[in-house]
Amino acid sequence: MSSSHSSYTSPSERPVRAGQPERTIRAGKLIVIEGIDGSGKTVQTRLLVERLSKQGYQVEMTDFPQYGKSFFADMIERYLKGEFGWPQELKDHLEKHPLPGKGFGSKPEEVNPYLSSLLYAGDRWEIKGQMNKWIDEGKIIISNRYVCSNMAHQGAKISNIKERNKFFKWIEELEYKVYAIPEPDLIIYLHVPTEVSQELIKVKVQSEQGFK
């Protein structure tokens, strides 16, 4: 079995663009753990929280989407179940006058990424007040998924590279400027081979279903 490894980027290492305000020094820190499904994000997030806590740091953990905890997370669950697609009036029209190669967008992957990404961004916006409070108190926040997950999952719907990069910039503006959520101080990416992540997902599903 191939081994996994991680890499990280710090926003402080990125060049400041002309006209971009300099980042202010904050009392606390926001560390984000990202990776594909089945890469072990949840496990590594909890391990990091435990380790930092034992070292005497005040640590808080966030997990996105916040299923069962936020308005937008409930909407995300409905979106993933395929409840949101095209307006019913348009569906009725297309049933009578179908267009070649056009579906109703009832599947999550068929919903316009600019629309579906608003749900995930809104989920983070709901807790931004609490996150800012923790940071002001000097706490370290460890987040399982953050803005990069929104970019990856929704951006995968866009095949054109130029349009995808345009979408990524739009996401950054939406989350960090419009919703003004905290920017991470450190992003850790977990790199795991696809075959390994698929096996981990299989084990997780079996565990949740009560199989050994």
Image: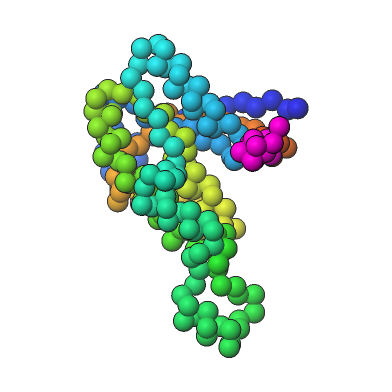
Nearest the viewer among 127 and 132 is 127
In depth, the one of 204 and 99 nearer the eye is: 204
Q: Does 136 lie within the magenta span?
A: no
What's the magenta region?
A: 202-212
The question of residue 206 being in magenta is answered with: yes
Q: Quadrant of residue 21?
A: top left
Residue furthest toward the bottom?
Answer: 96
Kindly indicate the quadrant of the structure image that contains residue 6.
Answer: top right
Is 159 or 97 nearer to us in this picture?
97
In this picture, is 20 found above or below 55? below
Figure check: 5 above or below 167:
above
Q: Does residue 164 lie above or below 56 as drawn?
A: below
Q: Which residue occupies 45% across, 19% down?
A: 50
Identified at 48% across, 25% down, the residue is 46
The quarter of the picture where the N terminus appears is top right
Where residue 40 appears, as percent x and y from the top left, is 58, 31
